[in-house]
Amino acid sequence: MTLGAALGAAASTVFDARSPMWVTGGLGTLALLSTGVWLIDGHRIRSLQRWLSGTMQLEPPKIAGPLGEVAYRIEKAVKARERAAEAERQSLEQFLAAIEVSPNGVLLLDDADQVQWFNRTAASHFGLDPSRDHRQRVTNLVRAPAFVAHLHAHDEKGDVVFLSPRGDATLSVLVRPYGKSMRLVLSQDITERERTDAMRRDFVANVSHEIRSPLTVLAGFVETLAELPLTVAEKERVLLLMRQQAHRMQALVSDLLALAQIEGAPRPPSDQWVDVAGLMQHLESDAMALDGSRHRLTFANDGVASIAGSDTELLSACWNLVSNALRYSPDGGHVHVAWSIRADGMSEFCVSDDGPGIAREHIPRLTERFYRVDGSRSRETGGTGLGLAIVKHVVQRHEGELLISSEPGQGSQFRVQLPKYRSRVVDEALAEDIAAAGG
Ligand code: ADP
C-alpha cells in the first residue's frame, strides 16, 4: 500500500461513524495516521537536511507546513547574508583598486611584521616581488638600517628618509598602526622634491655669492675713497673699478630677471612670426658695438624668413650665443653667425667660432646656472654664468633643441634647431604675403 492510499483509507475509516468496527478500526487508523505523518515529516526533514548540507545553491525543497516555513526563512537569511558579503567584497575590491593605483606605496604588516599585502607602488619602491614576498618578514626584504630602526622604534608620528633598496630613489616612509595589531607602511618617492630643494638651495647660495663678491669690492673702495687721501689718477682708477663691479651686479640682476620672466611667461605663440632679417640686423649691429673690430664677423641667412615665437626671447637667446663667441674667442678670430633650413624643414641658427674650444667633460654642464669652464675669464668679460641657461630655456619653450659641439683648440659650434611648424622659408612667406594681399 502506498502512503497516499494508507492515509486515504485511514481518513475514510475514522470518519465512518456507522461502522460497527468504529473503536478498534479507529485506534488502528490513528496508529496508521501517525505513522504516515511521521514518515512524511521524516521525508521532509531529510530533504531539508540534504539541502542544508549541500551548497544551498539549489532552490530549497518545496515542503508544506512549518518545516517549509523554516526552509523559506533560512533561504531568505542566507540570501541576505550573501548579498551583504557580495557588497562588502565589491567595496573592498574598489578600495584595493584605488590603493593599487595610488602614487604612494602601501604595505600591510601583521603583528610579526610579515608582509600581508602591498600595492604596485610599494613593490617598486621596496623592490618587492608579489609572487615571492608575501608572508616574508619585512626587515628581511627592506634592510635599510634607518627603516629597520624606525620600524622597531614604533615611531607613529615622524617619517624616515632613506635610499630605496635599488638605490634609484629617495623614499620618505611613515609607519602607522592599523586594526588591532597590524601596521601600515606608507612610502613616497621624494627624489624629485629633494632634487629641486637642493637646486633651490644651490641657486640661492650661488646668487648670494655672485652678489656678495662685487658688493665686498665696492664697499672696500668706498672705504678707500672716504679714508685715504688719493691722487686724481688713483681716484679715477678706483672709480673705474667700482663702475666695473656695479656693471657686474647690474648684468647679474638683469639675467636673473630675464630667467624669472622666461620661467613665468606663457608659452611662446606659434602664430606670431619674428622676422629673421630684422633679428640678424639687430644681432649684427650689437655685435659690432660690443666687438669693435677685434674679430672677423660674418652673417648669413640661407632661406629662413621668420620664426614663430617670442621676439624678445629669441633675440636674447641668439645674442647670448653671439656675445659668448665674441667674449671667449681671442682677438683676430672668426665668428660666423648663420640661419639655414635643414632638409627635414627645421630651421637652424648656428654660431661658430675658432676660439679656445671646450673640453668634452664640460659640455653637458654648460647650460646649468652659474656653471663656468673658466670663472675668471667669464667674469673678466662681464659673464654672469647664466647666458646658456637662458638659451636652453628659450629653446625648450620653442620646442627646439640646443646642440653644442666643441674641441679644445678647434673652436665651438652652438646650434639652435627649431621645429618645422615654427619655421617659415622665404618662398612660403612670400606666397603667404601675396595671398594675404589678395594677389
Ligand atoms: P657666461 O656668462 O660665463 O659666459 P654662459 O652660460 O653663457 O655663462 O656660458 C657658460 C660657460 O660656457 C662660460 O663660462 C664659458 O666657460 C663656456 N662658453 C660659452 N660659450 C663659449 C664659447 N663660444 N667658447 C668657449 N667657451 C664658451
Image (cartoon, helix red, strand yellow):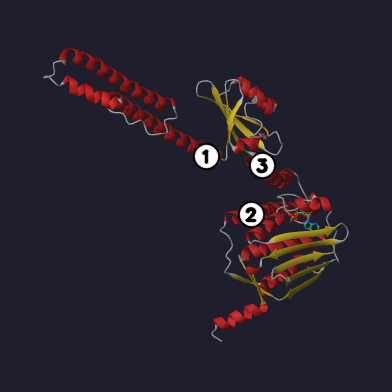
Within 10 Å of the Cα at label 3, are there few (<14), some (14-19), or many (20+) other Cα atoms?
few
Identify residue type, mark 2.
Leu
Q: Which residue is mark 2?
A: 259
Which residue: 61% across, 81% down?
Answer: 431
- Circles 3 and 2: CB atoms closer than 8 Å: no
Q: For the residues carrying marks 1 and 3, which lies nearer the camera in this image?
A: 1
Q: Quadrant of ligand 1?
A: bottom right
Q: Quadrant of the C terminus?
A: bottom right
First along the sequence among labels 1 and 2: 1
Question: Marks 1 and 3, how far apart in space?
Answer: 31 Å
Q: Quadrant of the N terminus?
A: top left
Q: Position of residue 299 (x, y in %)?
A: 76, 72
Within 10 Å of the Cα at label 1, are there few (<14), some (14-19), or many (20+) other Cα atoms?
few
Query: Which quadrant of the view contains residue 206?
Result: top right
Within 10 Å of the Cα at label 2, are there few (<14), some (14-19), or many (20+) other Cα atoms?
some
SS assignment at label 1: helix
Residue 83: mark in rendering = none
Which residue: 58% across, 66% down?
Answer: 270
Q: Which residue is mark 3?
A: 195
First along the sequence among labels 3 and 2: 3
Left or right of residue 375: residue 308: left
Question: Marks 3 and 2, how far apart in space?
Answer: 19 Å
Q: Nearer the viewer, residue 289 or 168?
A: 168
Q: Which residue is mark 1?
A: 97
Q: Position of residue 297 (x, y in %)?
A: 79, 70
SS assignment at label 2: helix
